[in-house]
């Protein structure tokens, strides 16, 4: 499918007059329409709730849009819990799906009334000593081995640090019940960025069958099943996008077949999608600053891997549109680079694009999840602003760009930057 930017060149020019590039921009209309589709796709399940994975896009303005559609938040660190706290999330609005968890984070999660999703058997005792075992508790499952769909390997849970083994789950549920837990959840995350409508239904079957077994072997009341994240997006034009209504219907069929048939038709379904909720509705906008002609043709832009790490870290493909040249032929081959002293600082390698002139704006697609949030400060680069393109076409700054003051702020008592910063 052709990938089209959600914003025009003239709008970007207008925004850039006020907020210089690079910046991340988000599409309110796209976020809303998608959130409504997700809600509709699972409306057959009475207790359905999507807990947006905060780590994907930790911006209160954006998360508050999702909350209008009934979403909660999935947190896994102190500051993610603090963000949830700050926007008024409490109790069942918060899923705490952490691992290798510091004591103070369990204590804070407990104080907020968050649903705690334990990553490990030993955390039962760890949590018990800290806060006692709450009435509602969840555990994360790892089936080990390889996870495949239709004979093709999707991922390798056996090599992943997360979750309980099945034996540990059975034993763990019994212990938790003895310690006073009344309602139980199970969770698993077996593959990331799956671009297939079959992932959730396949995962659901594993978890639903496990739920029946756990009920039978432990007598515990299974209140919810959390399918977690992993639903992918079409980063490449040739990728076939997931259809969330097909996914919802696929999960419904397995639910009927396994849960309803076993007298468990009242189990709530939860999801913790990050990428699917926000990925396509954010982009990194950067300006072509330099061209370089050596053994290859390079365009150097004013963003770098610190603003979007996925290409450098995973070799991930992010589609690029040269704004205003949407209909021109892609007959130039470029490496699109940032300014880090790191040769992997490239948003694209050997990419066919229209001829780029200095000052052109590049729209780097699908940066709305695991984009800004994976940013870092290497080479002293500062994090960019985040801007919301509103439904009415207006725009709003929803996070300012970092300044040198922010970068040096952790040298608390060292006055040597004061004079420099005031200049
Ligand atoms: C990262 C993460 C998610 C979100 O994953 P996506 O691939 O963005 O959907 C959900 N749950 C947990 C526990 C995670 O670590």
Image (cartoon, rainbow, N blue to C red):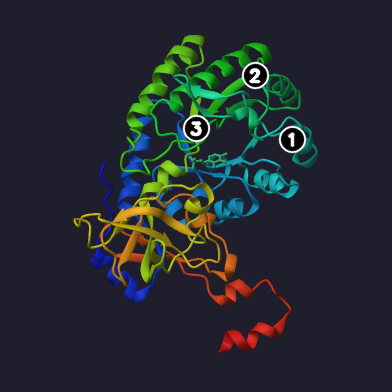
Q: Between marks 1 and 2, how big is the CA–CA gap?
A: 19 Å
Q: Quadrant of residue 207?
A: top right
Some atom of ligand 1 lies within 8 Å of the CB belonging to the residue at label 2: no
Residue 198, compared with residue 39, is above or below; it is above
Q: Between marks 1 and 3, how big is the CA–CA gap?
A: 22 Å
Residue plotted at (38% across, 53% down): 350
Query: Which label is found at residue 106?
Result: none
Classed neighbour count for the residue bearing mark 3: other residues with Cα under 10 Å, few (<14), some (14–19), many (≥20): many
Q: Between marks 2 and 3, how big is the CA–CA gap?
A: 18 Å
Q: Which residue is mark 2?
A: 220
Q: Nearer the viewer, residue 111 or 239?
A: 239
User: Which one is in front in this view, the residue at disc 1 or the one at disc 2?
Assistant: 1
Classed neighbour count for the residue bearing mark 1: other residues with Cα under 10 Å, few (<14), some (14–19), many (≥20): some
Q: Which residue is mark 3?
A: 270
User: Which one is in front in this view, the residue at disc 2 or the one at disc 3?
Assistant: 3
Residue plotted at (57% across, 88% down): 422
Q: Which comes before the other along the chain, label 2 or label 3?
A: 2
Classed neighbour count for the residue bearing mark 2: other residues with Cα under 10 Å, few (<14), some (14–19), many (≥20): many
Q: Which residue is mark 1?
A: 123
**Residue 104, how many percent across, how many down?**
73, 49
Q: Nearer the viewer, residue 263 or 374?
A: 374
> Tag 2's secondary structure?
loop
> Tag 1's secondary structure?
helix
């Amino acid at each position: 499918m052709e990938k089209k930017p959600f914003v025009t060149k003239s709008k970007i020019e207008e925004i850039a007059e006020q907020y210089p590039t690079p910046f991340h921009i988000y599409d309110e209309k796209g976020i809303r329409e998608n959130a409504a589709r997700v809600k509709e796709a699972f409306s057959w399940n009475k207790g359905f709730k999507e807990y947006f994975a905060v780590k994907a896009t930790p911006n209160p303005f954006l998360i508050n849009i999702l909350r209008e559609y009934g979403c909660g938040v999935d947190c896994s660190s102190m500051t993610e819990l603090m963000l949830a706290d700050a926007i008024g999330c409490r109790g069942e609005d918060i899923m705490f799906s952490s691992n290798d968890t510091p004591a103070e984070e369990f204590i804070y999660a407990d104080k907020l009334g968050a649903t705690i999703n334990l990553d490990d058997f030993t955390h039962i005792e760890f949590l018990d000593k800290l806060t006692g075992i709450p009435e509602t508790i969840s555990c994360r499952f790892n089936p080990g081995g390889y996870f495949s769909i239709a004979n093709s390997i999707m991922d390798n849970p056996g090599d992943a640090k997360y979750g309980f083994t099945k034996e540990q789950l059975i034993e763990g549920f019994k212990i938790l019940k003895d310690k006073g837990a009344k309602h139980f959840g199970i969770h698993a995350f077996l593959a990331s960025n799956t671009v297939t409508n079959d992932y959730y239904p396949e995962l659901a079957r594993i978890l639903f069958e496990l739920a029946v077994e756990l009920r039978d072997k432990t007598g515990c009341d299974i209140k919810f099943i959390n399918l977690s994240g992993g639903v992918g997006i079409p980063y490449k034009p040739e990728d076939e996008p997931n259809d969330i209504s097909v996914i919802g219907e696929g999960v419904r069929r397995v639910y009927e077949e396994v849960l309803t048939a076993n007298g468990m038709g009242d189990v709530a379904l939860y999801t913790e999608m990050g990428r699917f909720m926000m990925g396509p509705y954010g982009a990194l906008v950067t300006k072509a600053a330099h061209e370089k002609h050596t053994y290859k043709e390079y365009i150097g832009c004013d963003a770098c891997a610190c603003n979007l790490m996925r290409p450098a870290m995973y070799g991930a493909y992010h589609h690029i549109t040269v704004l205003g040249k949407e209909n021109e032929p892609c007959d130039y081959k470029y490496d699109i680079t940032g300014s880090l002293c790191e040769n992997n600082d490239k948003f694209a390698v050997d990419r066919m694009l229209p001829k780029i002139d200095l000052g052109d704006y590049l729209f780097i697609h699908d940066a709305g999840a695991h984009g800004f949030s994976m940013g870092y400060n290497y080479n002293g680069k500062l994090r960019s602003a985040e801007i919301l393109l509103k439904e009415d076409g207006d725009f709003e700054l929803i996070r300012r760009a970092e300044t040198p003051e922010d970068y040096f702020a952790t040298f608390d008592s060292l006055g040597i930057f004061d004079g420099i910063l005031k200049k």
